Amino acid sequence: MSALRITYYSADFDEATWIPGLQAALPGAAVSLWQPGAPTADYAVVWKPPQQMLDEQRDVRALFNTGAGVDALMALRLPEGVPVIRLDDAGMSVQMAEYVCHAVIRHFREFEGYEADMAQGKWSFRKPRSRLDYPVGVLGLGVLGERVAKAVAQFDFPVNGWSRSPKALEGVQCFHGAAQLHDFLAASRIVVCLLPLTPETDSILNARTLAHIRPGGYLVNVARGAHVVDADLLAAIDSGHLAGATLDVFRVEPLPKGHAFWTHPKITITPHTSARTLRAESIAQIARKIAALQRGQSVAGLVDAGRGY
Ligand code: NAP
Ligand code: GLV
């Protein structure tokens, strides 16, 4: 029997470590970097591949996405009938929980203000805030959103969650569907975006929806930049309706020089780093799934191309 052939391409990750890593995890396979015109492999492991790769690798048994979000893949013409499998946590949910809890607590406890005061040699106290006045709303209750909602609830914040289908999560008031978005936002003061980017969620945080967040609200976007209409967010902050934002993702990345988010005093930015793809965990997960598919078993993380996530 001939060796399994795995083809690898990533726009961002280093093939010099991923290819030997995949090879070590799949000893019987032949893993190689995709080149234009390469023969069809059995499986493709990709991140933001060129359309040409998908057009040529039409007969792969599955496409593995080396990230959680599949929006870049969904924007391409996919080989018909080939399952797309996303990373299913692989060490991301704990990173996301850390990042979001840090952003929520930093804002709630006014640490930024204290840092500024201390830097000026000022020994100051601010009136303690009540966490009941800071309900946290998590948009998206999937692999990452559920972990984040539960982590935030551990700090006794009231927590709301919004998903497409109805959910019941202990310690989280759950809302679902477009009809309940308004009520979800009106019940939340710190809003965390953990939605996939799909035609339904593109620009979902705009002037109309931001206006529904409780006055003095705060946005944490760790999903995709295109969820937010930048000008509407800036206007909501500059009008005083929102107190500020922490943004990890942007419409254009790297964030273009001169963009207002770089210097806005009420906006904290990070370079798309809230939950990184961890190479060892991700390779182990992909290798386990390839072995399961080879045995004819089903695997978690199957993307529904119709829904776009
Ligand atoms: P997931 O498991 O697919 O969960 C998505 C959640 O969003 C689900 O709860 C889903 O509802 C909900 N949803 C989708 N469309 C909706 C709609 N139209 N209305 C209401 N709810 C909707 O995704 P995940 O693994 O948690 O990841 C979420 C996103 O995080 C990724 O797609 C990616 O863009 C982003 N991400 C960012 C980073 C970073 O470093 N910044 C890292 C990893 C991931 P149902 O439960 O009803 O299906
Ligand atoms: C990162 O943004 C991912 O989707 O994994």
Image (cartoon, helix red, strand yellow):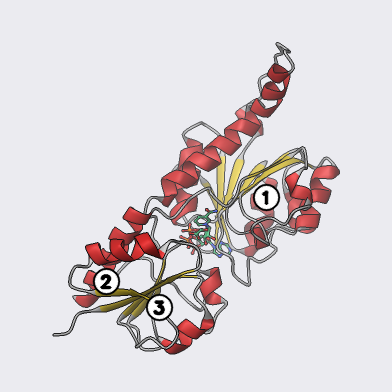
- Of residue 41 and residue 102, the one placed in the foreground of this image is 41
Tell me the kind of residue under disc 2: Ile
Pointer 1 residue: 185
- Of residue 90 and residue 218, the one placed in the foreground of this image is 90
Q: Specify the farthest residue to the front.
A: 16
The residue drawn where x is 83% and y is 40% is 240
Residue count near mark 1 (Cα–Cα under 10 Å), binned few <14, some 14–19, many ≥20: many
- Disc nearest the viewer among 2 and 1: 2
Tell me the kind of residue under disc 1: Leu
Residue count near mark 3 (Cα–Cα under 10 Å), binned few <14, some 14–19, many ≥20: many
The residue drawn where x is 23% and y is 62% is 24
CB at disc 3 and ligand 2 closer than 8 Å = no
Pointer 2 and pointer 1: residues touching (CB < 8 Å)?
no
- Of residue 14 and residue 147, the one placed in the foreground of this image is 14
Disc 3 is placed on an element classified as: loop
Would you say 283 lies left or right of 75 here? left
Q: Quadrant of residue 244?
A: top right
- Of residue 92 and residue 30, the one placed in the foreground of this image is 30
Q: Residue 277 in the image: x percent, y percent?
A: 43, 55
Disc 1 is placed on an element classified as: helix
Pointer 3 residue: 34
Q: Going from the N terminus, do you reach mark 2 or mark 1 first?
A: 1
Pointer 2 and pointer 3: residues touching (CB < 8 Å)?
no
Q: Residue 293 in the image: x percent, y percent?
A: 25, 75
Disc 2 is placed on an element classified as: helix
Q: Is residue 96 visible?
A: yes
Q: Specify the farthest residue to the left.
A: 1
The residue drawn where x is 13% and y is 85% is 1
Q: Going from the N terminus, do you reach mark 2 or mark 3 first?
A: 3
C-alpha separation, residue under disc 2 versus residue under disc 1? 41 Å
Q: Quadrant of residue 79?
A: bottom left
